[in-house]
Image (tube, rainbow, N blue to C red):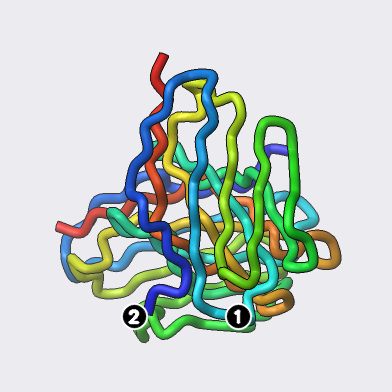
Amino acid sequence: DTGVSQNPRHKITKRGQNVTFRCDPISEHNRLYWYRQTLGQGPEFLTYFQNEAQLEKSRLLSDRFSAERPKGSFSTLEIQRTEQGDSAMYLCATSLDGRDTDTQYFGPGTRLTVL
Amino acid sequence: DQQVKQNSPSLSVQEGRISILNCDYTNSMFDYFLWYKKYPAEGPTFLISISSIKDKNEDGRFTVFLNKSAKHLSLHIVPSQPGDSAVYFCAASIRNTDKLIFGTGTRLQVFP
């Protein structure tokens, strides 16, 4: 098992551009979460999928953010018209339904810098 | 509204001694608590967890204590090793709601 993977690891973009991040979960983990972490803070919840269904979205997830998980496997997080305030580490975590569902395993993150 | 608080931003401990990291929470609905360790440029790594029906859980050098009446938990690392130097995050959840609420972290430095 290779763990949760995220791509790219780093992304630098100009304000106003669109960016997309990908998360590949631990195999058989049907729950997938996105978090955002800024400097000096802990990770903050953004959204959550169970299989392909998006079950919860944080108020932090503005209309410029969209997440998908087609077929219940990998997930993508897209940010449209990026702003400097979007600069952060975006973390993906997964867990297995029915066993320690509250234990989430994190990927290495994608660090976004908006210039 | 910070529901999970780690009031010590940093802690320095000598190798071989005990490290005690503290965490306080305000939401009495939280019933599951976790500790994660994070190295720079990596995602958080799960360390240990505890359900609210217990007051202690131990895994090797790591022990988590939960005091529900005080809404306080702590992570003990004994003996501390230089490789333990990292940022430690406390997290809490309400079971079956899936969302983890994190504290702001404590940076632990273990020196020889």
Residue A64 numbered mark, or none: 2
Query: The residue marked by circle 2 belongs to what chain?
Result: A
Secondary structure under tag 1 reads loop
Tell me: B105 left or right of A50: left
Q: Amino acid type of disc 2?
A: Arg
Q: Residue at x 60, y 80 (%)?
A: B28
Q: Residue at x 27, y 66 (%)?
A: A86
Near mark 2 (Cα within 10 A), the count class, few <14, some 14-19 or many ≥20, is few
Residue A20 position by quadrant: bottom left
The one nearer the camera, A31 or B22, is: B22
The one nearer the camera, B17 or B6, is: B17
Q: Position of residue A90 (x, y in %)?
A: 42, 58
Q: Nearer the viewer, mark 1 or mark 2?
A: 1
Q: Position of residue B30 (x, y in %)?
A: 63, 75
State whether residue A92 is above or below residue A49.
Answer: above
Q: Residue at x 21, y 68 (%)?
A: A85
Q: Amino acid type of disc 1?
A: Ser
Q: CA distance from mark 1 to mark 2?
A: 34 Å
Work out which quarter of the rendered image holds the C terminus of chain A and state it.
Answer: bottom left
Query: The residue marked by circle 1 belongs to what chain?
Result: B
Q: Residue at x 54, y 79 (%)?
A: B27
- Most extreme residue toward the top is B112
Can residue A22 be seen here? The reply is no
Residue to which mark 1 is pinned: B28
